[in-house]
Image (cartoon, rainbow, N blue to C red):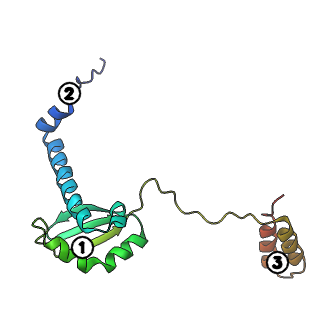
């Protein structure tokens, strides 16, 4: 018995008929409208770093791309809250929460590569030879092994 997939349906039909998709689509549209209102109150430089995650029970949850922007927005939190409260949609706003979530495309910050010059490696190696502590000597020798060859 072979599996036969259901025939493809147009996206518009799915959005009209499937309740979970319809609810999800309406929630996405609502968040897009709220994002436009938020963008109108944010500084132009902050707009690309701040996005609405949720709005319920008087609490606005904003996702910020990094700690730098979260700090800047926290300093402006009272002003932003007052400005948003003047809009009808955010009239019941009682608090704004900021959560830092780096974008998916941002690679994690790695440590500095261990590239040292040949001369530096030789100096570290000669220093290691004069050290009597075996742990410190081993650490210096490992460091000297990162010299450019």
User: Is 39 on the left-hand or right-hand side of 121?
Assistant: left
SS class, disc 3:
helix
The residue drawn where x is 37% and y is 75% is: 72
How far is disc 3 from disc 2 in space, using C-alphas? 72 Å
Instruction: Quickly name the residue at label 3.
Output: 134
Q: Residues within 10 Å of mark 3 (few under 14, many from 20)?
A: few
Q: Nearer the viewer, residue 42 or 27?
A: 42
Q: Residue 11: percent from the left, percent from the top?
A: 21, 33
Which callout, 3 or 1, points at the residue further toward the start of the chain? 1
Quarter occupied by the C terminus = bottom right
How far is disc 1 from disc 2 in space, using C-alphas? 40 Å
Q: Nearer the viewer, residue 124 or 129?
A: 124
SS class, disc 2:
loop
Asked if the residues shown at circle 3 and circle 1 are in contact, with their CB atoms under 8 angstroms apart, the answer is: no
Q: Quadrant of residue 53?
A: bottom left
Instruction: Quickly name the residue at label 2.
Output: 9
Q: Residue 138: percent from the left, percent from the top?
A: 80, 72
SS class, disc 1:
strand
Quick check: 65 above or below 124? above
Q: Residue furthest bottom?
A: 132
The residue drawn where x is 86% and y is 68% is: 119
Quick check: 85 above or below 26? below
Q: Nearer the viewer, residue 126 or 4?
A: 126
Q: Residues within 10 Å of mark 1 (few under 14, many from 20)?
A: some
Q: Residue furthest top?
A: 1
Which callout, 3 or 2, points at the residue further toward the start of the chain? 2
User: Is 88 on the left-hand or right-hand side of 32?
Assistant: left
Q: Residue 123: percent from the left, percent from the top?
A: 87, 74
Instruction: Quickly name the residue at label 1.
Output: 96
Q: Residue 109: percent from the left, percent from the top?
A: 55, 63
């Amino acid at each position: 018995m072979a599996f036969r997939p259901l025939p493809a349906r147009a996206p518009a039909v799915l959005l009209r008929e499937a309740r979970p998709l319809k609810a999800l689509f309406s929630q996405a549209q609502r968040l897009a409208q709220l994002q436009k209102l938020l963008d109108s109150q944010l500084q132009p430089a902050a707009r690309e770093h701040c996005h609405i995650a949720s709005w319920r029970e008087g609490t606005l949850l904003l996702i910020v791309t990094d700690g730098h922007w979260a700090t800047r927005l926290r300093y402006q939190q009272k002003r932003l809250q007052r400005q948003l409260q003047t809009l009808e949609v955010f009239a019941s706003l009682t608090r704004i929460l900021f959560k830092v979530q780096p974008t998916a495309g941002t690679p994690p910050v790695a440590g500095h590569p261990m590239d040292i010059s040949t001369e530096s490696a030789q100096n570290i190696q000669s220093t290691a030879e004069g050290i009597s502590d075996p742990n410190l000597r081993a650490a210096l020798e490992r460091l000297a092994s990162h010299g450019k060859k």
